[in-house]
Amino acid sequence: MVTVAARPFDFKLDPARVALIVIDMQRDFLEPGGFGESLGNDVARLQAIVPGTARLIEGFRAAGRPVIHTRECHRPDLSDCPPAKLSRGAPGSRIGDAGPMGRILIAGEPGAEIVPELFPIAGELVIDKPGKGAFYATALSAHLAALGVTQLVFAGVTTEVCVQTTMREANDRGFECLIAEDATESYFAKFKQAAIDMIVAQGAIVGWAAPVAAIVAGLA
Ligand code: C5J
């Protein structure tokens, strides 16, 4: 075990049993001209974590540990999108509508793809998920069991929605969870802060938080 300085207390990293999950670093959430920006969000906030996330991914690749990417997206016929999700958001900018980068959050459309800087390499798992959490209606649990993973490091967007939801799902399934606080972001600074505070509260009730540099140093 390697000690990583983390909040609310040191994280005992097991370099042989840890995997990285990079949540939804998709063009439509991050890139100028995409779905996120069309809703009035400042995507520069999300763009700012790309270099840190790239360093984290590189650290896992160099250590020979699994890097798993997720994409929030749906089938073109929307059969995997419940009406309650379909009816949310701004009218005209809902899931499946024509957006600046193709149909919004539809698999295969340019906007649903991962940004080029963080693109998966051959052999890395990419999980397409219809929900905010990456365990719901996916094979993620089975993949993690097959890999013998017991610890998960989280990066990606947005902190308070898909990252936090997946981290809570993982925590309930018995994984030790660590969020890389400078490789996750929200369109709303106070939501990121609140989400991380909630995660580490009450003695790591959902998990731990640490900077990328400390996590990468622990893997080396
Ligand atoms: C993600 C969202 N990825 N905010 N989605 O967090 O709708």
Image (cartoon, rainbow, N blue to C red):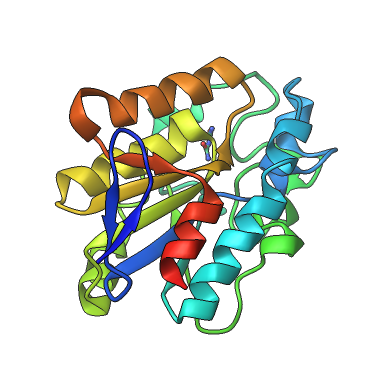
- Seen at 40% across and 40% down, the residue is 209
The location of residue 147, given as percent across then percent down, is 27, 77
Pick the residue in front: 170 or 53.
53
Pick the residue in front: 120 or 199.
199
- Seen at 54% across and 52% down, the residue is 212
- Seen at 44% across and 58% down, the residue is 21
The location of residue 218, given as percent across then percent down, is 42, 64
The location of residue 52, given as percent across then percent down, is 65, 52
- Asked which quadrant contains residue 179, the reply is top left
| Residue 12 appears left or right of 54 | left
Is any part of residue 59 visible from this angle?
Answer: yes
Position above or below: 82 against 23: above
| Residue 211 appears left or right of 108 | left
Is any part of residue 205 visible from this angle?
Answer: no
Position above or below: 107 against 42: below
Q: Residue furthest right?
A: 33
The location of residue 103, given as percent across then percent down, is 69, 45
- Seen at 51% across and 25% down, the residue is 192
Q: Residue furthest top?
A: 190
| Residue 216 appears left or right of 104 | left
